[in-house]
Image: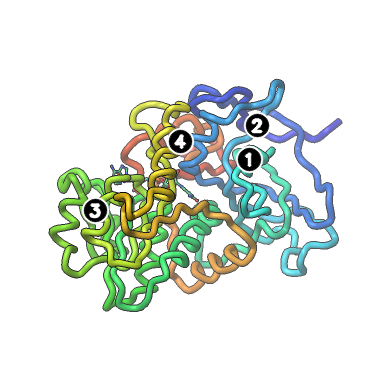
Amino acid sequence: MTEQMRAWTFSQRGRAQDVLTLGSIPKPTITSPDQVLIKVACTSLFSSYKAIMALLPVSAGQKRIPEAEFSGEIVEYGENVREELKVPGLAVFGLTLPMEPKTDLLRFMRNPNGTLTEYVVVRQNLIVAKPANMSLEAASGMAGIGATAVQFADAAKLNTGDYVLVNGGSGAVGMLLLQLLKKIVGPEGKVVATCSGSKKDVVLQYADEAIDYRAHAPVHTYLAQEYGTRKFDAIIDAGCTQELYDHSPDYLNEGKRFLDMSAKHPIGRGWQYSDLLPLIANQMKNNFWPTLLGGVPRKYIFISGTPDYKTLQKIRELIEDGTFKGTIDSVYGMDEVIQAYDRFSGPDARGRVVVDVRRDRLHA
Ligand SMILES: NC(=O)c1ccc[n+]([C@@H]2O[C@H](COP(=O)([O-])OP(=O)(O)OC[C@H]3O[C@@H](n4cnc5c(N)ncnc54)[C@H](OP(=O)(O)O)[C@@H]3O)[C@@H](O)[C@H]2O)c1
């Protein structure tokens, strides 16, 4: 009889809390020599997955496991995996998304097996050894979000002494970005972040200034006043605020980059297809409206973070040298996934919401 494992699955699209059920499914096995079987320890909930679960259709009869990032330990490996991974019990972190080709925007859809389960099979280039100075809980949120932070920081093309703004600095990507950007611009540079007023203390652990986006609404007016003379050398938008780009010449230096990462998440309700329309409209406007005809005279770039082996190694180094620190809000047990999504969907989480799939009733 096929060995079974516990897994949260969904068979129709919708809000996680409405469509997920906990059950037993067959445990996966290695089917090619470059794969590794991992016993999952923890998975960190991933903001983009809320949209994926709500919007991407599920084929009839299919049971999909959500989420993508994980930490865990090696159980079995194929003969072609790199030597450092041929160690049963080795602690690793990674993600289950296919990573190539880089242009594959449907990779979430093509991901058959998520990580809210006890075992995953992944290709060797999707995992790296976990550094000893980070817990399994924190490492479970580093591969996907970390890759996004590393690739946005690279694309910002910053130097020592530069000024950079992160809109949405209190989020999962934002907090890692702040940690990395401060290292890049150094003490003479300045890292400024926007966030809710209640999260300013978390943000100020890494940023030089935290701007409460409600108290200073509209933020673009505040930025024009405060940074109209010494403008920013890059802006990274993790808070999805189109007006920030529209007004960016007031506070972003000429020739510098505005880097965008997402569509605005709906507040207080689940995703609907119509929520994608502003994203599409803004992409068209920001990319194709010529400056000569009134388009914004600043370089706009939308990036889809794409983890690859090189980036995962870089993340490992940044953990080892203390740049990347884990930012955990809370840890839930395997039987508390609905509570975990409630916390994750609310406004109060201060860091990553983690599910420890090895244990039950952690939060009771
Ligand atoms: N392109 C990519 O490769 C990529 C990869 C990962 C994620 N994403 C997307 O990037 C975005 C950030 O991801 P995440 O995982 O960091 O999400 P997250 O943890 O939910 O963080 C969202 C951030 O947006 C802020 N925010 C909310 N409303 C805002 C407003 N009106 N003005 C300014 N900031 C506001 C939040 O601040 P408070 O919590 O303080 O209110 C928080 O800092 C999401 O939309 C996600 O889907 C894109």
Up-down: is 329 above or below 259? above
**Residue ID for mark 4:** 340
* Crowdedness near tag 4: few (<14), some (14–19) or many (≥20) residues, C-alpha within 10 Å: many
Secondary structure at numbered mark 4: helix
Q: Which residue is mark 3?
A: 200
Say whether residue 251 is visible: yes
Q: Looking at the rendered structure, which numbered label has been put on residue 64?
A: 2
As displayed, is residue 207 above or below residue 187? above
Q: Is mark 1 within 8 Å of ligand 1?
A: no
Distance, label 2 to label 4, CA atoms, is 18 Å
Q: Quadrant of the C terminus?
A: top left
What is the secondary structure assignment of the residue under circle 1?
loop
**Between discs 2 and 4, the one toward the N terminus:** 2
Are circles 3 and 4 on residues that touch, CB within 8 Å? no
Q: Earlier in the sequence, mark 1 or mark 3?
A: 1
The type of residue carrying mark 1 is: Gly
User: Are the two marked residues, 2 and 3, in contact with CB atoms closer than 8 angstroms?
Assistant: no
